[in-house]
Image (cartoon, rainbow, N blue to C red):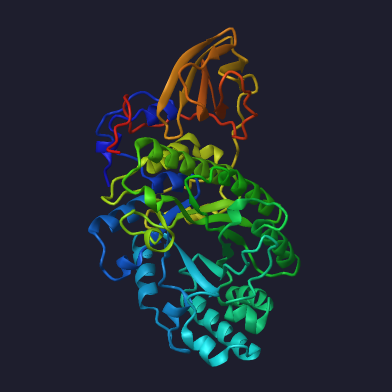
């Protein structure tokens, strides 16, 4: 899908990729293409309206063009796949798998063992009967995973099994599985799923993992459970952080980074599985360009973390367009996605693109086998998608910010450019004697590029007022690699 009416005046490509202006009619890269080059999967759900053929044609066109991983909103949950005991309904799941295969999209399965959306017959017939419930769950997992063996790459084996207390533990109320079986249902579910499809990735998935690793938190509980599972030979390969948040939750990207690092030590992948960043519903119709830019700023930070942590493989947004979202009816939030109600890309889309283009493929480490990213229909394609060799930043060129002054080591005179988190230029100047004053920039987080001859360095920096000192950035160094750009000079034009 073309978005040139939005991007024709954006300096993003030239600014962040280090090239000149290109032909205005050059093909625009997509999220999908850039994700593939970096050995990652970025995607979204297929809404229930899609399964019922009750969605606009724009939806599918954008979906298959922009994304390379998909998950069903509801259609592969227990009540959908086994509405009657031992009578399975795979019609809608099969529809999604066929769509994914035709468009070469990775499939996530969601979800096998969950306390919610369990068919009513389970509790009506077997509540409190341990052996019966074990048999029911085992049969369900074997039949569902077995049906999709080799077609679904990854399953949410257990979903939302941790309670919401600050002193985290397993959810003991409202779960037919825990109340009737106990915690062993989790271990058993992973074992059964692995037996049904030994090659599938198997995840534990939950919400509120993005709130940090403090004592008693869900995230710290998950890490301890993963340690136990790994020690006991339970075949868990990934954790999913749902990450349904509001625009005010500005600390969550770095919490996700900390969780990724903790799980990396255990040899487990962390995926963002259900991201949406919503505004309070009462603000609908009152949102300004600055509000949408703030939303984009937060999406950008999540994507930066995703691309910089080598054990993160999937980035799934829980919806494509604000026209079809669970948030308005169920969560009291609104306008959380990359596309608005008219299917126009928002600054959040720009931010995801800016992050992808600011992280060259040579710098992004993929947790996956590179063969996953070779198109089997294209025998001429070579595997250039994953270059896991990290490129070190020039040892002679470095930078730091103090107040509004940028100090540069390794160059007496260098060109300095500053971009907001949507990739738009906000400052351009030249350092003299190793420093430059960053004038006219509001406080916040920016991408700063320094160029001295053939050396180029980009860092994410906090820029503060003169009386404050920025803490060292946690962002990674990386080279800027020349590649064709789809953007031309100018400023961003939006209808917000």
Percent x, y of residue 196: 56, 77
Question: From the viewer's perspective, is residue 163 above or below residue 180?
Answer: above
Residue at image x 43%, y 25%? Answer: 18
Q: Specify the quadrant of the image occupied by residue 139.
A: bottom right
Q: Residue at x 45, y 79 (%)?
A: 79
**335 or 101, nearer to the observer:** 335
Q: Is residue 404 left or right of residue 489?
A: right
Is 201 or 117 nearer to us in this picture? 117
- At x 67% / y 57%, what residue is drawn? 217
In the rendered structure, the answer to whether residue 334 lies left or right of residue 124 reads left
Among the 4 quarters of the image, the one containing residue 327: bottom left
Location of residue 188 with respect to 289 vertically, above or below: below
Between 39 and 114, which is closer to the camera in this rendering? 114
User: Is 469 situated left or right of 454 in this image?
Assistant: right
Quarter containing the C terminus: top left
Number of numbered discs present? 0
Is there any visible trace of residue 374 in the rendered image?
Answer: no
296 with respect to 139 (left or right): left
Residue occupying the point 26% across, 30% down? 24
Q: Residue furthest right?
A: 231
Quarter of the figure with residue 90: bottom left
Q: Residue furthest front?
A: 282
Query: Which percent across, then down, holds residue 21?
Result: 33, 24
What is the x, y in percent for residue 48?
Answer: 35, 68
The spot of residue 20 in percent (x, y) is 36, 23
From what the image shows, is residue 357 above or below residue 236? above
In the image, residue 474 above or below residue 178: above
From this viewpoint, is residue 426 visible? yes
């Amino acid at each position: 899908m073309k978005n040139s009416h939005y991007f024709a005046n954006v300096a993003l490509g030239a600014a962040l990729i280090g090239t000149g202006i290109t032909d205005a009619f050059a093909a625009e890269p997509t999220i999908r293409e850039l994700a593939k080059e970096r050995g990652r999967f970025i995607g979204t759900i297929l809404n229930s309206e899609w399964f019922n053929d009750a969605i606009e044609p724009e939806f599918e066109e954008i979906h298959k063009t922009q994304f390379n991983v998909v998950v069903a909103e509801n259609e592969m949950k227990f009540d959908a796949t086994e509405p009657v005991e031992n009578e399975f309904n795979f019609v809608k799941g099969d529809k999604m798998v066929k769509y994914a295969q035709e468009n070469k999209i990775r499939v996530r399965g969601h979800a096998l063992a969950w306390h919610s959306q369990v068919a009513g017959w389970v509790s009506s017939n077997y509540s409190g009967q341990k052996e019966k419930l074990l048999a029911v769950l085992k049969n369900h997992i074997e039949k569902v995973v077995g049906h999709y063996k080799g077609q679904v790459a990854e399953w949410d084996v257990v979903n939302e099994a941790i309670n919401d207390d600050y002193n985290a533990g397993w959810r003991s109320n409202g779960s037919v599985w825990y109340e009737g079986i106990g915690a062993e249902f989790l271990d058993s579910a992973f074992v059964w799923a692995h037996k049904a499809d030994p090659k599938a990735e198997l995840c534990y998935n939950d919400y509120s993992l993005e709130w940090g690793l403090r004592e008693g938190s869900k995230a710290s509980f998950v890490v301890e459970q993963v340690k136990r599972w790994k020690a006991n030979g339970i075949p868990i390969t990934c954790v999913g952080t749902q990450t349904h948040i509001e625009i005010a939750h500005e600390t969550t990207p770095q919490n996700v980074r900390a969780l990724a690092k903790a799980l990396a030590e255990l040899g487990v992948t962390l995926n963002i599985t259900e991201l949406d960043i919503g505004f309070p519903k009462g603000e609908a119709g009152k949102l300004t360009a600055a509000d949408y830019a703030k939303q984009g700023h937060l999406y950008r930070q999540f994507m930066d973390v995703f691309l910089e942590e080598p054990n993160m493989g999937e980035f799934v947004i829980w919806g494509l367009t604000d026209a079809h979202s669970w948030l308005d009816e169920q969560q009291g939030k609104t306008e959380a996605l990359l596309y608005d109600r008219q299917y126009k890309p928002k600054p959040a889309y720009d931010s995801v693109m800016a992050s992808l283009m600011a992280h060259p493929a040579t710098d992004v480490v993929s947790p996956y086998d590179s063969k996953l990213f070779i198109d089997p229909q294209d025998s001429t394609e070579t595997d250039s998608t994953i270059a896991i060799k990290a490129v070190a930043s020039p040892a002679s060129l470095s930078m730091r910010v103090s107040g509004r002054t940028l100090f540069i080591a390794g160059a007496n005179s260098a060109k300095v450019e500053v971009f907001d988190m949507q990739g738009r230029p906000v400052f351009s100047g030249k350092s003299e004697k190793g420093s430059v004053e960053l004038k006219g920039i509001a406080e916040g987080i920016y991408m700063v590029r320094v160029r001295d001859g053939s050396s180029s360095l980009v860092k994410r920096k906090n820029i503060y007022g003169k009386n404050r000192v920025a803490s060292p950035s946690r962002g990674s160094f990386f080279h800027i690699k020349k590649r064709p750009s789809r953007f031309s000079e100018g400023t961003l034009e939006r209808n917000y």
